[in-house]
Amino acid sequence: MLKFIFWSLLAVNAALFAYGRGYLGHFSGNEHEPERLLNQLNASKLAIISADQANKAAASTAAALNDAKPAPPPVQACVEIASFVLADARRFETQLAALDLGDRQSRHNLPGSEISSYIVYIPSQGSKEGADKKAGELRALGVTNYFIISDNSPLRWGISLGVFKTDNAAQNQLAALMKQGVRTARVAPRMSGSKLLAFQFREVDADLKAKLEKIRAGFPNAEVHSCK
């Protein structure tokens, strides 16, 4: 009987010792057996850092997030506000002066309803560089009577090859140019200018658009359009 008690106590003490050292794990599931660390994936890449290092890392991350700049608002290429009679156009222009838009702002007459002349032209080349290149091609063909259109009309950065009173005269000029090798010229009627005016604005972002709309609100007959 004494032997049984002795061996029982010995077994219980051994079990308690193993449990205390973590060889048998814990009921909470947070095991500490030596083999567990060896079986972890990428155990060699784990590093223990101090609380101070952890706080500095968190502060650095928060600062980086705070410094992140929002994306700039989209820019609308061109906005046109029309149609103004001369007196209203002058008042509108006076109020625009405070915005100091420089060459981002322009004014032009809206086309009328009657044909005043006919133009022989090469369509817009998209930019001054493109127009200069096309002009060089014309010179190589012996064409010297031309000029690059640089105003804010739909033909901006196109090339004028002559303006004529009648369609017949314009067609004769086009035929002569084709004989010289010009293949992209066209004829189009030019409308007489009306008494109505329009303003165009370029590089318009959300802030400028809001300011323009605030001014436009004082002119109930004016309309806003997109332009090129």
Image: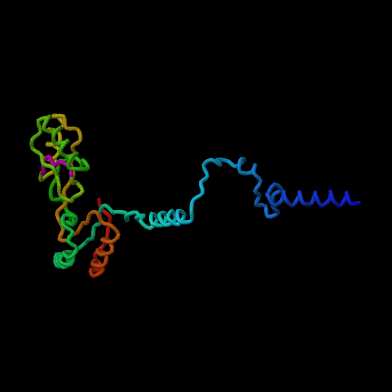
Res. 157 image quadrant: top left
For image coordinates 12% across by 36% down, the residue present is 173
* Prevailing secondary structure of the magenta residues: strand
Res. 39 image quadrant: top right
For image coordinates 24% across by 66% down, the residue present is 216
Looking at this rendering, what residue extends furthest in the bottom direction? 218
Percent x, y for residue 13?
A: 77, 51
Figure check: 181 above or below 61: above
Instruction: Give the left or right position of residue 155, taking residue 52 as reference.
Output: left
Which region is colored magenta?
157-163
Percent x, y for residue 156?
A: 18, 46
**Residue in the foreground of this view, choosing between 170 and 111:** 111
Percent x, y for residue 124?
A: 20, 42
For image coordinates 51% across by 49% down, the residue present is 48
Instruction: Give the left or right position of residue 220, taking residue 176 as reference.
Output: right
**Residue in the foreground of this view, choosing between 100 and 4:** 4
